[in-house]
Amino acid sequence: MASKIIGGMTEQFYHTLPDPLDLITTSPTKEAISNFLTQITYKQFPEFILDILVKILNHRKVDITDGQGDEQQDILTMSPSGTRCLIQCKHTQQVNSHYNGTDLDNMVTVCLRKKCKTALFVTNGDLTPQGKKYVTDREYNRLTEDLFPESNVNLEIDYWNDLKIWDLIKDNADILHKWFSGMGQTSGLRRFKFNVFVQKLPYYGFENIELGSNRLIELITSTGKVKSIQDDNLNGKLPSGIEISIKKWFQHTSQIDIHYVLPEKNNDHPYRLFDALAIEVTVQENKYKPELVRDQVIDFLFNGALPSLKNDPGKWWHITASSCKSFIFLFDVGEPREIKLCSAKTYVTINCDQIYGEFEYCSLSKEHFKPTYPQSDEQAIWTHESGVHVYQMFDQKLHPVEVYQNQLRQLNNISSYEHFRFYGAFNVDNALSMRIRSILPNEWVAMLYNKDGIIWGIPSNFSGREIDAIHKKLSNIYINVLEVDDITKNNILKNVSHEMPPADFFYISDMNDLGFPVDLSERLICLISDILVEKMTIEIGIELLKYKYALEHQHGFTHLKEEGEIHSHTSEIPSLLADMLSLRGKVMLDIGVNSKPMKVHIRYRKSILLPSDLLVKQCIEDAMCIIEDLKLLADGKTINDTNYIV
């Protein structure tokens, strides 16, 4: 076992791929810069430009006249050479806005009137090619020659667009901290990426459960939602305006930042390399939630695209999307970095016509269920509007490293059993061994021995009288209790420590501890309800036990031996009615008659593929009928049920 785990942990995949950060050698895109500068408001823009002039270009402020009646003069400064400079500011929220030569002509006439020989036209947008040519070819001087042919006026006019503003401020920490709260490097994230791969579950063997990237591209293209551009690269656009580009890639399961282990017996799987698609998303909004955008993209691409599973009952498609990541440029160090915007997420689709988030598929709606303990962080027990308490148990596979750690804990526990007193019984079948375990206190350790034996160890803090009382209960059901000598005990513990199989599956009930993918075909729905009983008698206990055995017999489990009878003692009735430690059949009924009010636990083992919300509601409807029957029996009445036969 240990060698397998270590082999899995040390297995590596090598690919001759460049680091994505090494591919970034330029500044952010023009669109990103424009979106970045739109954070400055219209009223703040002249003051922002003045800060650049004063702190970076060493101008001296003369006046700010921005507002109505400013006559095309927003700022007036004195340049380092001592000339008056007129600045006209044009702020826009539309990053695609362009200004032309007409705006510059108006500024020329103002310069002549204000006796300014230099002027600057500033916008967080851009100029049209004609407007830029007007400045670079100094066409504005032709206007002064026509108006004042004898004045020899020679103006100097320049313009700043979004790119020129960026070049000026990108290395200035004072400007960035004042105007962008030091967060300039994380603003304007309009693009992010994630990887996605698809599998068919559940996985029972070494069958091919994965849809390769070629097949995924074929399926997605067939829907007409995306189009191929070149070399199997796809482009598409969502109705909301979100743009996506898709290419073939791969995803290593060890890099998925959630508890991710497939429920199958291949310990190499947590370190597998999956054939995947890399999806790059471009968003137009100034503010958005990456996880919600990813949900939209997954639904857009895969809703109705995956093959039908009508001829493959009990199967479902499982979609894994990696964490969303984006690149930012750190001004302080002048280097790009890749950052994580949100964690990985998994999705399921049963009929291929609706995509569910896997966690949401397994959760209960807050419309009909409330947390039983709202002050607690755990999400385990919920209360239905009918008053029934609900918790789900999910059959989960342990990560191989956790299996190894759990095995070490078990070995340590076994070493502590050397000081226990051991007893045993033989010629015991599985049903009888379950009954024995239900009688033994929880502090005692029980182990199956060979094919027909069970042994149990007793801690030293139990007195002889307590031990005799428990063993007397066992003798009442015809169990011959034998004491295990020290030599045999040591040999048994030694063999157990050497041959103990690793426990690689377990049940969890807290949604916070849920691992993915979830085995939707192995869910345990547990319901709890209270019944008021005026007086519990042996006769009522026997009727409840008969009902319990009849119900569980209907759902695939029999408590009776081959001869159709069971030997018991009245003192054993409470432990027979409440056996929460065993799993048996499709429906399990346990009744706590020693508590007031009487506790009823009904467990449903469900393999039907439905969202947990609907599945639990079906179980509650069935459980309410059982609870009504139990109320009648607890009142000493009879029920009219033809199946109520033992």
Image: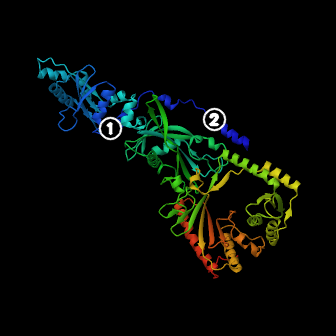
Q: Relative to residue 510, is residue 152 depicted above or below?
A: above
Identify the mark at residue 78; answer none if there is no mark. Answer: none
Pointer 1 or 2: first along the chain: 2
The answer to whether 436 appears left or right of 29 in the picture is right
Q: Relative to residue 356, is residue 615 depicted above or below?
A: below
What amino acid type is highlighted by mark number 1? Ile
Quadrant holding the N terminus: top right
Count of numbered badges drawn on the protein: 2
Tell me if residue 58 can be seen: yes
Secondary structure of the residue carrying tag 2 is loop
The answer to whether 182 appears left or right of 343 in the picture is left
Q: Residue 609: x, y in percent?
A: 56, 59
Secondary structure of the residue carrying tag 1 is loop
Name the image quarter holding residue 41.
top left
Residue receiving disc 1:
40
Q: Residue 9: x, y in percent?
A: 66, 39
Tell me if residue 124 can be seen: no
Separation of residues labelled 1 and 2 (CA atoms):
48 Å
Q: Closer to the camera, 19 or 413?
A: 413
Residue receiving disc 2:
12
